[in-house]
Amino acid sequence: MCGRFTLSTPTEMLAGLFEIEAAPLPDLPARYNIAPTQDVAVVRKPGAEDPRELALLRWGLVPFWAKDPEIGSRMINARAETVAERPAYRAAFRTRRCILPADGFYEWRKEGAAKQPYYFKASDDRPLGMAGLWERWRSPDGGELQTCTIITTEANVAVRPIHPRMPAILRPEDYALWLDPGLDARDPLEALLVPVADDALVGYRVSRRVNAPANDDPEVILPIDGAD
């Protein structure tokens, strides 16, 4: 799964890397411990004729048909193998795909009596583009909530010793295909949801301070020599 990630790349740089055309850009403070149910940045094309935009959505997808938006806290991840079929995700998979920029993500492995967090980032230090879905939910009183989820796939060689799953990370050359709301053919989309190249990521142990979402500072991504 992917339950925490980071994003500290300046917003203007993200706009260039992900070819954001819509303005204004949201204010994105540096984040080192992004947790479920918080607002996160997503890249999307709301409609076929719309430019790419950088929007803030709540992490934890609430299907449009849900009666209670609290369901979103249990839907922070969608499995690549079933995302096109599950009722909660299939409508969004057809037309509401997005990308979640990230500098890196965390995974945990049980070591002794506790779980040890590890941080994974791109080998070249460039931001990652995690495949996701977004959705609109309307309350009975007419209010609107926009939410998102991160799609996960099998772990690559770098992540597998720590966790069997990882975010589905898109190649920059595949961003346009993934974001195209006019494309609803399953095969070319599902073909993108595969483990990233084995040499694309590096990972290392970090402090268990990251276990608490309140610890959102640069120290939580610093490598440590052993379990703390």
Image: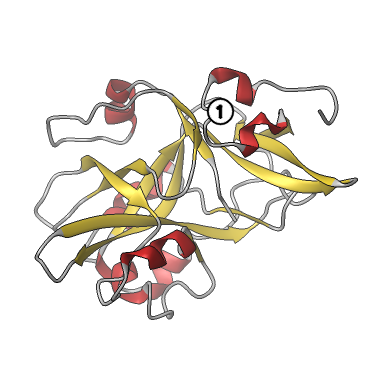
Looking at the image, the residue that sits furthest to the right is 112
| Left-right relation of 208 to 60 | right
| Left-right relation of 107 to 42 | right
Q: Please tell me which residue is depicted at 62% across the width and 46% down the height of the picture.
A: 197
Asked if 160 appears above or below 189 in the picture, the reply is above
Residue 183 visible in the shown view: yes
**Which residue is disc 1 drawn over?**
215
Q: Please tell me which residue is depicted at 71% across the width and 33% down the height of the picture.
A: 208
Q: Nearer the viewer, residue 191 or 26?
A: 26
Q: Amino acid at mark 1?
A: Asn
Colouring scheme applied when the structure was drawn? secondary structure
Q: Nearer the viewer, residue 81 or 63?
A: 63
Q: Nearer the viewer, residue 39 or 185?
A: 39
* Residue 58 place in picture, x, y as percent: 33, 49
Q: Please tell me which residue is depicted at 57% across the width and 26% down the height of the picture.
A: 124
| Left-right relation of 123 to 217 | right
* Residue 121 place in picture, x, y as percent: 59, 33
Asked if 78 appears above or below 210 in the picture, the reply is below
Q: Nearer the viewer, residue 186 or 154?
A: 154
- Crowdedness of circle 1 by 10 Å Cα count: few (<14), some, many (20+)? some
* Residue 166 place in picture, x, y as percent: 61, 52
Q: Quadrant of the N terminus?
A: bottom right
Q: Please tell me which residue is depicted at 35% across the width and 20% down the height of the picture.
A: 10
